[in-house]
Image (spheres, rainbow, N blue to C red):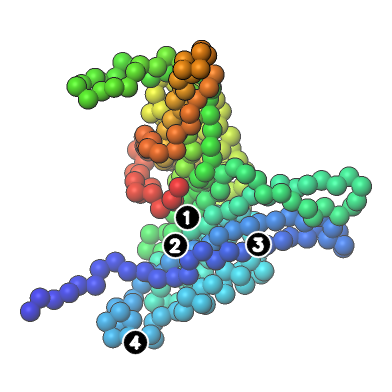
Amino acid sequence: MSKHVLAQNQYGKAENRIVRIARKGGEDGAWHEIRDLNVSVALRGEYRDVHLTGDNANCLPTDTTKNTVYAFAKEHGIASPEAFAILLAKHFVTSQPVIREAQVRVEEFAWERIPVPTRKEQHSFVRKGQEVRTAQVTYSEATGLQVLSGLKDLTVMNSTNSEFHGFIKDEYTTLQEAYDRILATKVTARWANSAAAAAADPEHDWDRSYEKARRHMLEAFAETYSYSLQQTLHAMACRVLDHVPTVNEVRLNLPNKHHFLVDLEPFGLKNDNEVYFAADRMYGLIEGTVHRDGVQPVIATSDWITA
């Protein structure tokens, strides 16, 4: 009779939606700050009996993990997605001996303030239509703390300064060489923070490092004269590593959002690189990791962030 082996397993509460409002501005708290998060918790440890016999003695209910997320938001506030995830991950591992490792994934949805000059209260916001900020924290007493920051759904475009030519051609190649094309992509990025930033400095400014990484990625995209999206990917990752010293590794997922010139000749019109068809399916998918020399990559090559 063959035996079955219980392999990797984990459990937790996924997609806990939480909005934390910090009321500032003196006694009346008229100035509000918002953190809008989607938090997922996964716990790993001694759960053999839970699966094999249904003995729940070692099982912390997923409802408890959900309650902890909300309670910690009240008790500790949310300084940043990374800082909040670190608090949660360390809590689960250190508070329950059967939990060997905790992974907390966070998505942040950004809001912009709607200023109202005629009133002192400032509590009106509009949802940003750009990227979703992400964070993933993994902690165990054996291996320590790992913090991955990132973003997704950041759509960017260069309407010129992009070419693609000199590629391999065989009997199935129909693509024409391009010497002036639109380059557009929806960026998914993750970057691994150094152990010093993650563990040794509890006051590390995660918001500032996120904004720096995002800004340098965008600057590299805008300033690179591109001969391929692969070249642009490399330039974006290198710019982050050059300007954010606490980052050791960057992985980018860049779908090529193809724009095809529309044939206007049937209408007696010339299309001088002005009118394009924006295709959403199918698309080229360019992915890659760039890391500092001597650093062992830790970011998985299969994305957990879905488009």
**Residue at the spot x=54%, y=19% of the render?**
274
User: Residue type at mark 3?
Assistant: Val
**Residue picked out by circle 3:** 19
User: Residue type at mark 4?
Assistant: Asp
Q: Are marks 3 and 4 in contact (CB under 8 Å)?
A: no
The CA span between labels 4 and 1 is 30 Å
The CA span between labels 3 and 2 is 21 Å
**Residue at the spot x=44%, y=70% of the render?**
12
Report the mark closest to the observer, 1 or 3.
Answer: 3
Horizontal arrangement in the rendering, residue 289 relative to residue 121 (left or right): left
Q: Is residue 25 above or below residue 48?
A: above
User: Residue type at mark 1?
Assistant: Gln
**Residue picked out by circle 4:** 55
Q: Earlier in the sequence, mark 3 or mark 2?
A: 3
User: In the structure shown, which secondary structural element does the residue marked by tag 3 occupy?
Assistant: strand
**Residue picked out by circle 2:** 103
**Count of marks, rendered view:** 4
Q: Position of residue 159 (x, y in %)?
A: 53, 22
Q: Position of residue 41 (x, y in %)?
A: 47, 66
Seen from the viewer's position, the closer of residues 141 and 185 is 185
For label 2, the crowd category at 10 Å Cα-Cα, with few meaning under 14, some 14 to 19 and many 20 or more, is: many
The CA span between labels 1 and 3 is 18 Å
User: Residue type at mark 2?
Assistant: Gln
**Residue picked out by circle 1:** 136
Q: Are marks 2 and 1 in contact (CB under 8 Å)?
A: yes
The CA span between labels 2 and 1 is 7 Å
